[in-house]
Image: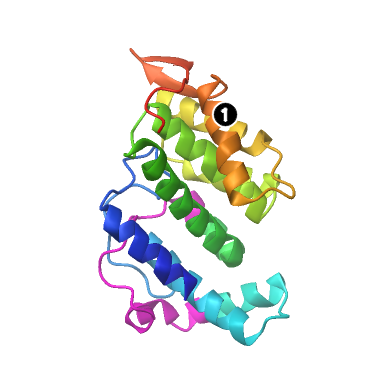
């Protein structure tokens, strides 16, 4: 399954997203409710199940996929992590906040796209900056790219809803920074663009000062520092 290849790549990096600025949902893992998606480990299981379902039902609609995933969750399918080779530790194994949990209930297929794009954004951030920083250029890059990739995977409206929900428990300058960089990512024209082209567009946004970082407790323009 494609999602397992992504896990292998990220596990080799050994670097996780940091605190609330990261789109991998901050907080410590908790014992999940097997009938509700509460952690990003649950999202990994959901993503793997969706891939299997689509492989068997390539012509299924998103509504049919949503219905399948909803039934899968209600039947305790989240307990099947071992079936997909998902262990107790995966990148971004953290709690979802209440706003995110509500969105998963409404749009489980979208939730898998949010999860995979967040993982991709992390991977590209590490390869571009050599780290997953906080309140710096790499943080701005990650949020901007995550939103651009979500827009490509869904649409701008859905991407905004998920990105805003992710900031449900954040506050202050950090929240302002993230929301600003999220919006810049969604402003990028992703139609008919490859992933590599989207990454290049985000690099341009960060290096030319279109995004924001925090220095001395102030929001300031980003620049090309740290970018490989």
Give the SS element for disc 1: helix
Which quarter of the picture shows residue 153? bottom right
Q: Which residue is drawn at 49% across and 22% down?
A: 212
Q: As rendered, which of 4 and 193 lies closer to the eye?
A: 193
Report the residue marked by disc 1.
Answer: 204
Asked if residue 183 lies left or right of residue 221, the reply is right
Q: Where 157 falls versus 4 (above or below)?
A: above
Horizontal and vertical percent for residue 44?
42, 67
Q: In the displayed image of the protein, which residue is found farthest to the front? A: 228
Horizontal and vertical percent for residue 152?
66, 51
Asked if residue 221 lies left or right of residue 4, the reply is right
Tell me, yes or no, whether the highlighted magenta stretch contains residue 62. Answer: no
| Residue 86 shows in the view | yes
Asked if residue 199 lies left or right of residue 86, the reply is right
Q: Residue at x 50, y 78 (%)?
A: 49
Horizontal and vertical percent for residue 120?
47, 53
Q: As rendered, which of 172 and 128 lies closer to the eye?
A: 128
Asked if residue 226 lies left or right of residue 102, the reply is left
| Residue 39 shows in the view | no
Tell me, yes or no, whether the highlighted magenta stretch contains residue 81. Answer: yes
Quadrant of the rendering where the C terminus is positioned: top left
Q: As rendered, which of 68 and 97 lies closer to the eye?
A: 68
Q: Where 48 falls versus 104 (above or below)?
A: below
Q: Residue at x 33, y 34 (%)?
A: 133
Q: Which residue is drawn at 49% across and 70% down?
A: 47
Mark 1 surroundings within 10 Å by alpha-carbon count, few (fewer than 14), some (14 through 19), many (20 or more): some
Horizontal and vertical percent for residue 56?
61, 87
Q: How many marks?
A: 1
Q: Where 105 falls versus 181 (above or below)?
A: below
Q: What stretch is highlighted in magenta?
A: 72-101
């Amino acid at each position: 399954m494609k999602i397992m290849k992504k896990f292998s790549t990220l596990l080799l990096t050994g670097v996780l997203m940091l605190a609330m600025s990261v789109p991998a949902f901050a907080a410590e893992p908790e014992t999940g409710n097997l009938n509700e998606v509460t952690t990003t480990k649950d999202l990994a299981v959901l993503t793997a199940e969706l891939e299997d379902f689509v492989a068997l039902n390539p012509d299924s609609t998103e509504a049919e996929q949503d219905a399948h995933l909803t039934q899968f969750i209600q039947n305790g399918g989240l307990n099947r992590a071992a079936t997909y080779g998902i262990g107790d530790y995966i990148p971004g194994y953290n709690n979802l906040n209440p706003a995110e949990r509500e969105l998963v209930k409404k749009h489980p297929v979208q939730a898998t796209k949010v999860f995979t794009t967040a993982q991709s954004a992390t991977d590209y951030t590490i390869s571009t900056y050599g780290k997953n920083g906080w309140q710096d250029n790499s943080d701005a890059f990650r949020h901007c790219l995550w939103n651009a990739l979500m827009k490509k995977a869904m649409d701008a409206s859905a991407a905004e809803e998920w990105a805003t929900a992710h900031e449900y428990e954040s506050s202050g300058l950090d929240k302002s920074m993230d929301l600003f960089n999220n919006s810049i990512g969604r402003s990028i024209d992703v139609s008919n663009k490859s992933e590599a082209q989207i990454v290049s567009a985000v690099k341009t946004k960060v290096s030319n000062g279109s995004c924001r970082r925090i220095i001395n407790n102030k929001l300031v323009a980003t620049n090309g520092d740290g970018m490989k």
